[in-house]
Image: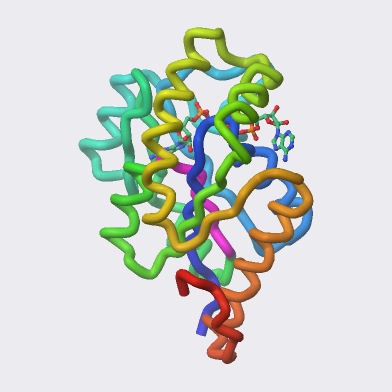
Amino acid sequence: MSEGFLLVLSGPSGSGKDTVINQLLKRDSQIVCSVSMTTRAPRPGKQDGVNYFFVSKEQFEENIAREEMLEWAKYGENYYGTPKSPILQWIAEGKTVILNIEVQGAGKIKEKMPEVRTMFLMPPSVQVLRARLKGRGTESEEEIEKRIAIARYEISHAYDYDYIIVNNRLEDAVEGVLEVVNRNRAMLRGEAVNNSYLFE
Ligand code: ADP
Ligand code: 5GP
C-alpha cells in the first residue's frame, strides 16, 4: 500500500503557509508541493513556475474549460487553481503532496477526494496576522485590510479541517505538521497508531 497522500493546507494570507512549506520541503525529501496557477501579478523576485504559474484570465478560463484543474477558486479579484496532472502521479510514487489552497478550494477537493487530509494553519491572533502581513511588505495597506477581512471568514471555517496547527513559534508549527504527516504515513502503511487526536 502506497503511503502517498494529499495534504491540503489552508490558512489566512500571512499565517505562514509558504514559510512552513519551505521548511517542510527542506526537512523531508518525500514531501512535494503543488505549483498552483494564478491570474494575480507575481510578487517581486518570484519566478514563473516556482511558486506559481502566472497566467492571464483568458488562459485560466481555457484551462477550466479543458478540465485541466483539480480545483479552482476566486480569491479577491483573481483566479487560483491546482493543475491536475502531476498530483495523481506523485501520490502513486508515495509522496506527501501539499496543496496550499484557500477554504473554498479545500472544500471542493474534500468533496471530490474524501481521503485527503486537511490542515488549517492558524495565526496566534488577528493582530499578529496584520503585523506579519505588514512585515512581509508585499501588499498595500488596502490589500492587507482586504486580506484580513477574508481571514475572518476563513478562520470561521477552521473547524471544518482535520487538523488545526497554530503558527506561533515557527519550529513548533513545522514539528506539528511533520508529526501529522508521519502519523498519516504510518496509518497508510497499516500500522496501528495511538489515536489521541481529537479529529482522527
Ligand atoms: P502565507 O504564505 O500564509 O501568506 P508567509 O509564509 O508569506 O504567509 O508569512 C507571512 C510573513 O510572516 C512572512 O514575512 C514570514 O516571514 C512571517 N512568518 C511566518 N511564520 C512566522 C512565525 N512563526 N513567526 C514570525 N514570523 C513568521
Ligand atoms: P497569495 O496571493 O497570498 O499567494 O494567495 C492567496 C490565497 O490563494 C491563499 O489563501 C492561497 O492558499 C490560495 N491559493 C493559492 N493557490 C491556490 C489554488 O491552486 N487553489 C485555491 N483554491 N487556492 C489557492
The magenta segment: 96-102
Q: Is residue 179 above or below residue 161?
A: below
Q: How many marks?
A: 0
Residue at 60% x, 85% y is: 194
Query: Residue 24 location, x and y as percent?
Result: 70, 53
Query: Residue 94 location, x and y as percent?
Result: 57, 71
Tell me: 108 left or right of 185.
left
Query: Residue 79 location, x and y as percent?
Result: 35, 27
Location of ligand 1 given as a quarter of the image: top right
* In front of the other: 25 or 106: 106
Is the magenta region chiefly helix, strand or loop? strand
* Residue occupying the far left of the picture: 65
Tell me: 1 left or right of 20.
left
Residue at 41% x, 52% y is: 85
| Magenta stretch: includes residue 20 | no
* In front of the other: 137 or 124: 124
* In front of the other: 29 or 170: 170
Q: Give the quadrant of residue 136.
A: top right
Q: Is residue 191 above or below residue 41?
A: below
Q: Give the quadrant of residue 30.
A: bottom right
Residue at 45% x, 42% y is: 101
Rendering colour mode? rainbow
Query: Residue 117 location, x and y as percent?
Result: 46, 64
Q: Is residue 100 visible?
A: yes
Q: Is residue 49 visible?
A: no
Q: Give the quadrant of residue 125.
A: top right
Q: Is residue 58 above or below residue 195?
A: above
Residue at 53% x, 55% y is: 164
